[in-house]
Image (cartoon, rainbow, N blue to C red):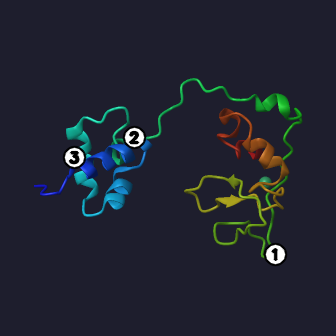
Amino acid sequence: MTAMNWSDDRVEQLKTLWTEGLSASQIARALGGVTRNAVIGKVHRLGLAGRASPSRSERPRLPMAPKVPSVRTQLPALPVVEEDPLTLDDGSHATVLTISDRMCRWPIGDPAASEFHFCGHNPKSGSPYCEAHARKAYQPQQARRAPDKKFG
Ligand SMILES: [Zn+2]
């Protein structure tokens, strides 16, 4: 049961904050003395529509046919030249344990398999990937679903 004190002032504040797009927990914090659930309950009772209900049912909605700037037209249509994965001094490849910020994080192989490793080459500045993999990463999904297939 909620024995919360919803004075007119607080209700107004709630409405304002809700309309401004704050989450229920943010509003609860701002008002003080109420729980997030109490805020949600009050919002429902007030019939404050016009917003998706918070948190639990909040899931990223697929944008409606987004106008994506055509990246492909901006990039030179060079073929992706992948180098063999970097081999470390001990003959192994870069793994989750040995990968560093200065190594390309392009995954090679099945993440569930023991031979799974990373490319490991010097990354392009501002990118987690080396030149070839950075370019590959911006290709359509289809092309990068199985990056290891090319080796096999
Ligand atoms: Zn790479």
5 over 136 or under it: above or below: below
Which of the two labelled residues, at mark 3 and mark 1, occupies the earlier sequence position?
3
Q: Nearer the viewer, mark 3 or mark 1?
A: 3
Label 3 CB-ligand 1 distance < 8 A:
no
Q: Residue pushed farthest top?
A: 65
Question: Image check: 30 left or right of 138?
Answer: left
Q: Residue pushed farthest front?
A: 9
Secondary structure state at the residue bearing disc 3? helix
Which of the two labelled residues, at mark 3 and mark 2, occupies the earlier sequence position?
2
Within-10-Å neighbours for mark 2: few <14, some 14–19, many 20+: some
State the count of labels: 3
Please state the horizontal and vertical placement of residue 104, each as a whole percent of the image. Answer: 76, 59
Query: Looking at the image, do the residues carrying marks 2 and 1 touch, with CB atoms under 8 Å apart?
Result: no
- Residue under numbered circle 2: 19
User: Residue 41 — which label?
Assistant: 3
- Residue under numbered circle 1: 89
Query: Looking at the image, do the residues carrying marks 3 and 2 touch, with CB atoms under 8 Å apart?
Result: no
Cα distance in 3D space between marks 2 and 1: 59 Å
The residue at 54%/25% (across/down) is 64
Residue 143, picture quadrant: top right
Cα distance in 3D space between marks 3 and 2: 16 Å
Instruction: Name the residue type under label 3.
Output: Gly
